[in-house]
């Protein structure tokens, strides 16, 4: 996992043959079913949401629960002053100019900013004068700076109210909802504050064309008609309270800003549009969110019908949390049908996003304590772990996942496999290829595996990488105890699976291939192919007596041509773990 910023920016510049650039010709606006710029050119959003920055959702930090609970647990560990120091570092480090520069380099043209209202205005319970609205500089200053970074990169910015005053849904984590206090829907004061906040934002950014749109409420999920039976509003038939609030927000925005697109969202996490009245503004976009379901035409037909019936642009405002295969198939589906998308998120403590934040040992101790699996760390240890976590938020300290970006930007437009790493077999030396460094490309082109995506409709319903490590493809990878590995090995192998490596061979000849494997109570088999032709017999692998007990098997006289070779490792019988491949030669008596 390369951590060098210059390395991975340079790598993606070389790898990505398809890119998009934002156009700055005037304000974006709705033109029938299209989003266009001032010159009438259609804009397809290709974006990422900055989840976890202004608003923390527990799962992104390796725990659970809404932010207010997380803050309370942190304060219990380290005290209020140190908690505030941690949050200041979090906000400073999570997203910086280098993050936006990198997104633009990778080929994205949009940033979606999930905003927590409390960075702009205090909760109604904390207003110095009840009923009045106080403004806080912090949220506006962060947004101003982000906008400048976006403008520097010719990349659009959408403002998204992710946590509305009081919270907009029973799914508490995504909006920091505290059920002991009035929700957005149970408090006119909260709704008044939300309307005022949007008016304030619109007034501030009215003349900024690189603000693409105002996404006025993220994933409302609230049952109005029968809350006890339908807490998330998925069975709601009218949604009248939701539509009324969005109309009131639109009216407030239009008092100060007649130029910007306004994004509306339905109930049930942005998907229940029942009861939607005639569209009340001629510059609206209808957004919906899509997770964990199939990427076929039927999955999006209801939104295509909405677009046609209402003659309004649609936008997939949030999706992700799946495998690279799912990412590629989803984006290909969206763009084939002429609408844009925004992924979730840019970074978190997890591997299925472009950037992964590390868990340092002291922070792991905190997580263990919170899960009742370890003792309470001392205040100093806990604070050190939190501050190291904040430091590790910086992009140069993240683990970069180039195959995730490749799956989102290049692969929807190309079926070609390309190298994940530069593998060069040099004559007279031993060249190690780690099996985890297989090519980047679609399933069936760069690798083949039995489980490649989650389409169950549930988070975690189908694991594609059973080890949940290193890469986000269907290949199953886990941490390795083999000190000769790169820290990971391929596991859970099954017959019919295969891995592909694009390799440059400096000298033609016959090479010996050492395969290092581990297995217990099973005897695996594999075969090597080069450029579509078998170059080894089917080789039986030893039962080593343990899944972390490693032995080498030598396959002699593997013929390789000079130049580029596409090597494929076919799994004939599975059940073994695979640590590394090592080529040595060519043999002195060998030709091809």
Image (cartoon, grey):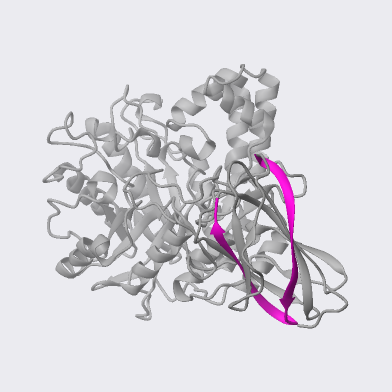
Query: Residue 479 location, x and y as percent?
Result: 64, 43
Vertical side of 318 occupied by 348: above or below: above
Query: Residue 330 location, x and y as percent?
Result: 38, 63
Instruction: Give the prevailing secondary structure in the magenta stretch.
Output: strand
Vertical side of 468 occupied by 76: above or below: above
Nearest to the observer: residue 588 or residue 388: 588
Vertical side of 370 occupied by 312: above or below: below
Image quarter (top left, top right, bottom left or bottom right) of the N terminus: bottom right
Left or right of residue 459: residue 300? left
| Residue 398 appears in the picture as rendered | no
Which quadrant of the view contains residue 446? bottom right
Residue 557 in magenta stretch: yes
Residue 404 in magenta stretch: no
Image quarter (top left, top right, bottom left or bottom right) of the C terminus: bottom right
Residue at the image position 16 percent from the left and 36 percent from the top? 224
Nearest to the observer: residue 141 or residue 356: 356
| Residue 261 appears in the picture as rendered | yes
Which quadrant of the view contains residue 88? top right
Query: Residue 62 location, x and y as percent?
Result: 53, 35
Nearest to the observer: residue 82 or residue 547: 547
Query: Residue 384 location, x and y as percent?
Result: 70, 29
Residue at the image position 13 percent from the left and 33 percent from the top? 226
Left or right of residue 458: residue 113? right
Left or right of residue 485: residue 277? left
Vertical side of 263 occupied by 360: above or below: above
Q: In the image, which residues are magenta?
A: 546-574
Total marks shown come to: 0
């Amino acid at each position: 996992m390369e951590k060098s910023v210059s390395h991975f920016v340079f790598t993606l510049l070389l790898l990505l043959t398809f890119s998009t650039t934002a156009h700055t010709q005037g304000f974006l606006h709705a033109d029938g079913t299209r989003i266009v710029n001032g010159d009438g050119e259609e804009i397809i959003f290709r974006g990422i949401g900055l989840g976890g920055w202004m608003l923390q959702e527990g799962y992104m930090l390796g725990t659970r629960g809404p932010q207010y609970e997380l803050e309370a647990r942190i304060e219990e560990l380290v005290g209020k002053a140190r908690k505030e120091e941690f949050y200041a570092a979090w906000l400073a480090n999570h997203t910086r100019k280098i993050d936006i520069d990198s997104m633009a380099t990778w080929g994205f043209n949009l940033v979606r900013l999930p905003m927590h209202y409390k960075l702009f205005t205090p909760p109604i319970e904390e207003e110095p004068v009840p009923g009045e609205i106080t403004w806080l500089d912090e949220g506006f200053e962060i947004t101003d700076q982000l906008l400048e970074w976006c403008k520097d990169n010719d990349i659009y910015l959408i403002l998204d109210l992710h946590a509305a005053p009081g919270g907009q849904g029973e799914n508490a984590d995504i909006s920091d909802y505290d059920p002991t206090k009035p929700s957005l829907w149970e408090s006119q004061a909260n709704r008044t504050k939300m309307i005022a906040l949007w008016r304030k934002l619109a007034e501030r950014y009215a003349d900024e064309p690189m603000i693409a749109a105002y996404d006025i409420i993220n994933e409302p999920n609230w049952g109005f008609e029968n809350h006890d039976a339908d807490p998330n509003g998925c069975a709601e038939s009218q949604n009248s309270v939701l539509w009324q609030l969005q109309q009131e927000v639109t009216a407030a925005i239009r008092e100060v800003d007649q130029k910007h697109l306004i994004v509306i969202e339905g109930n049930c996490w942005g998907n229940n549009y029942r009861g939607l009245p005639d569209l009340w503004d001629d510059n609206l976009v209808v957004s919906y969110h899509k997770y964990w379901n199939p990427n076929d035409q039927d999955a999006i037909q209801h939104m295509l019908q909405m677009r046609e019936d209402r003659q309004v642009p649609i936008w997939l405002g949030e999706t992700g949390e799946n495998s690279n295969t799912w990412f590629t198939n989803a984006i290909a589906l969206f763009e084939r049908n002429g609408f844009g998308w925004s992924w979730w998120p840019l970074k978190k403590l997890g591997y299925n996003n472009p950037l992964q934040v590390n868990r340092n040992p002291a922070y792991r101790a905190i997580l263990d304590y919170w899960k009742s699996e370890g003792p309470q760390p001392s205040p100093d240890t806990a604070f050190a772990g939190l501050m190291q976590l904040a430091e590790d938020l910086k992009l140069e300290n993240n683990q970069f996942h180039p195959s995730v970006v490749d799956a989102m930007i290049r692969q929807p437009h190309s079926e070609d496999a390309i190298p994940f790493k530069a593998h060069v077999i040099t004559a007279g030396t031993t060249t190690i290829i780690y099996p985890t460094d297989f090519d980047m490309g679609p399933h069936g082109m760069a690798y083949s595996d039995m489980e490649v995506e989650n389409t169950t409709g549930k988070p975690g319903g189908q694991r594609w990488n059973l080890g949940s490590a290193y890469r986000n493809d269907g290949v199953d990878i886990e941490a390795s105890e083999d000190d000769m590995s790169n820290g990971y090995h391929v596991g859970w192998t099954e017959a019919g699976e295969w891995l592909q490596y694009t390799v440059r061979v400096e000298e033609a000849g016959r090479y010996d291939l050492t395969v290092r494997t581990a297995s217990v109570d099973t005897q695996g088999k594999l075969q090597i192919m080069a450029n579509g032709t078998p170059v080894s017999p089917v080789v039986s692998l030893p039962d080593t007596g343990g899944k972390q007990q490693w032995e080498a098997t030598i396959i002699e006289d593997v013929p390789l041509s000079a130049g580029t070779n596409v090597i494929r490792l076919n799994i004939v019988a599975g059940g073994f773990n695979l640590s590394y491949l090592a080529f040595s030669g060519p043999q002195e008596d060998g030709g091809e």
